[in-house]
Amino acid sequence: MQPVLAPVLSVPLGDRWLIESRADLRVVDFQQGPGGSYSNESFATLEYLQLDYNANSHLTISAGRFLTPFNIYNERITPIWISKLQDAPYVAAIGTGLGYSDGLMLRGNVISTRDFAVNYEGYFSVASTINKLTSQRGTGGRVSVFIPHTRLELGTSYRRTLEGTRFNSEGADLTWEPYQAPIQIRGEWARSQSGFGYWIQASYRLSQIKGESSLIGRLEPVFRMQQFFRSEAIPNDSLPTTNAQQPTFGLNYYLPHEVRLNASYGRQLMSNATNTNVWDFGITYRFLFPAWPGASR
Amino acid sequence: MKARWFTIAAGCTFLFCTLALAQDKQNKPQTAPSASAHENAPNESARGEKLFRTNCGRCHNPPENISPREARAVVRHMRVRATLTDEDERLILKFLAP
């Protein structure tokens, strides 16, 4: 059992500025060995706290702590009310450092037309060893092309870690959501000195059968396949220690009022370790409220 | 081993696509917003809805019962996340808080 609270704060200041933040507060149960008693530990993580300045359509400047822009998982899919499977894929640990960076980020769109848009993100992160505010020194970015008529996006990412042993990470990502059906295909490929891997995920909301508010229309089957191939043993890189693959089947059920039930089963297959079953059951509830009294504009 | 799992992944993805697109043919087809449809949108709220669906809707549904104040904060947040333009931000705000 793992209750998670992920408060997001968004404070617009004038027409151009924004302060935004997200934390992750969770309690994790541990079993003291097979058949042993349970104990729990709480964790609090400040995932981002950034000041954004929207200079124009082509440039937004962000300073502070921000989610490392590498591929799509870290920035877009980590919110628990968005992710269709609660477990992160293996390669989400590649190129993202600790998941967040402390420094400066520039982002925006290079060009945006009716037929396509080219977007970019670039950042530099400083090293920090302050308790609860640790970060890694590194630099990198992402460039993507988005085709609105087909809702197809292709991106490529790069990161250079500038702390300890310096190394590069590269990645590529794909998102496709055709208008013709409530289907979503997402995937990533990434490599670093630790190894390389990919994940690809497909989900289909059954809303075409009797409408999205019907009993069956609220169901969404999900399938994800992922593999990781280890090339060098790097301690504490948050990746499987050996080659690994995991197919995962999930089923989400969207209740009214932004409540979602989810369940999934995966089989983790390791090349030099015991294979394991991975079960997840969860419920997410998203709500928002004004944090400060004020007049509407 | 690699080829086997890749084949399973590709097969399941293909199955998802086939099921979804086959089901779509039985229902009223929806089309992507064309350039002319975009130009002839009845009002800015409708254009904002299309932009929401194209950009923000790729990850999540619109929040329920949102007030104008909340909408302003949400859209500013989404502008940074989804790299929206000035015009996109304005129109999506029209959709969420008409």
Image (cartoon, rainbow, N blue to C red):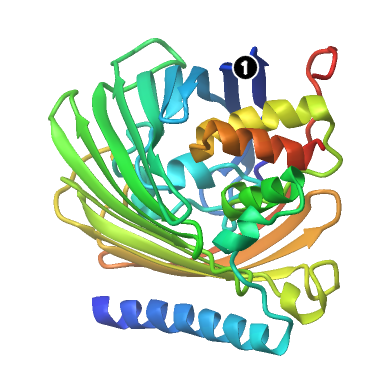
Q: Residue at x 42, y 84 (%)?
A: B11
Residue A285 seen anywhere in this rendered image of the structure: no
The amino acid at mark 1 is Asp
- Provide residue A149's location: percent of width, then percent of height: 51, 62
Q: Residue at x 14, y 49 (%)?
A: A232
Is A222 rendered above or below residue A43?
below
Q: Quadrant of residue A292?
A: top right
Q: Residue at x 59, y 51 (%)?
A: B59
Question: Local crowd at mark 1 within 10 Å, few (<14), some, or many (≥20)?
Answer: few
- For the image shown, how many numbered marks are present on the structure? 1
Relative to residue A221, is residue A287 drawn left or right? Answer: right
Relative to residue B65, is residue A198 drawn left or right? Answer: left
Relative to residue A216, is residue A161 drawn left or right? Answer: left
Give the labeled residue for mark 1: A15
- Provide residue A114's location: percent of width, then percent of height: 48, 53
Residue in front for this viewpoint, A14 or B57: A14
- Provide residue A49's location: percent of width, then percent of height: 53, 19
Quadrant of the image containing the C terminus of chain A: top right
Is A260 rendered above or below residue A218?
above
Q: Residue at x 72, y 27 (%)?
A: B72
Residue B98 seen anywhere in this rendered image of the structure: yes
Residue in front for this viewpoint, A10 or A54: A54
The secondary element bearing badge 1 is classed as: loop
Which chain is mark 1 on? A
Residue in front for this viewpoint, A145 or A204: A145
Q: Quadrant of residue A10?
A: top right
- Provide residue A255's location: percent of width, then percent of height: 82, 58
